[in-house]
Image (spheres, rainbow, N blue to C red):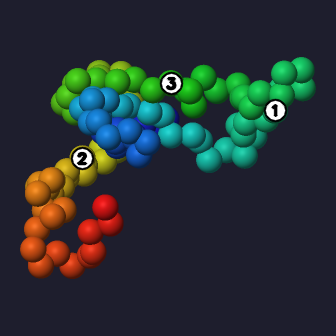
Amino acid sequence: MRARIYQKPRNAMQSGWAATHEWVLAYEPPMDPTARQHPDALMGWIGGGRTQNQVRLTFPTREAAIAYADGQGIAYEVEPASARIVRPKSYADNFRYGRIENCTH
């Protein structure tokens, strides 16, 4: 069983970075076609017999996630964290002289 260790990206629907500091250990689904998910006949929910597909463990640091995977004997792959690009902006730039776009207000 392999796992993937990664840092969660920022939610596109919100502007905050609050939930992006933790590292996640998620199991990769097996390539076995018999272990596919299927709809439940009664409720219509999608599910399967493998609980690991739903398990996501969070850790405060990458080293803690790696230590857990090593301690449990889980093969893992670490995805590097994406670099955050900060473009400084100023409200006064909306009204500066020589601006490329026309002011819309």
Q: Left of 62 or right of it: where is 13?
A: right
> Image point 67% across, 44% down: which residue?
32
Q: Tell me whether the residue at label 3 lies in contact with that at label 1, contact meaning CB atoms closer than 8 angstroms.
A: no
- Element type at mark 2: loop
Splitting the image into 4 quarters, where does residue 95 fall? bottom left
Can you tell which mark lies on residue 39?
A: 1
Q: Tell me whether the residue at label 2 lies in contact with that at label 1, contact meaning CB atoms closer than 8 angstroms.
A: no
- Which residue is labeled 3 in the image? 55
- Which residue is labeled 2 in the image? 81
Report if residue 83 is visible in the image: yes
Residue 17 screen position, x and y as percent: 27, 36
Residue 75 screen position, x and y as percent: 38, 37
Q: What separation in Å lies between label 3 and label 1 (alpha carbons)?
A: 19 Å
The tag earlier along the polypeptide, 2 or 3, is: 3
> Image point 70% across, 25% down: which residue?
49
Q: Amino acid at mark 2?
A: Ala
Looking at the image, residue 62 lies above or below residue 84: above
- Between residue 4 and residue 81, name the one nearer to us: 81
Q: Amino acid at mark 1?
A: Pro
> Image point 34% across, 24% down: which residue?
58
- Between residue 28 and residue 57, name the one nearer to us: 57
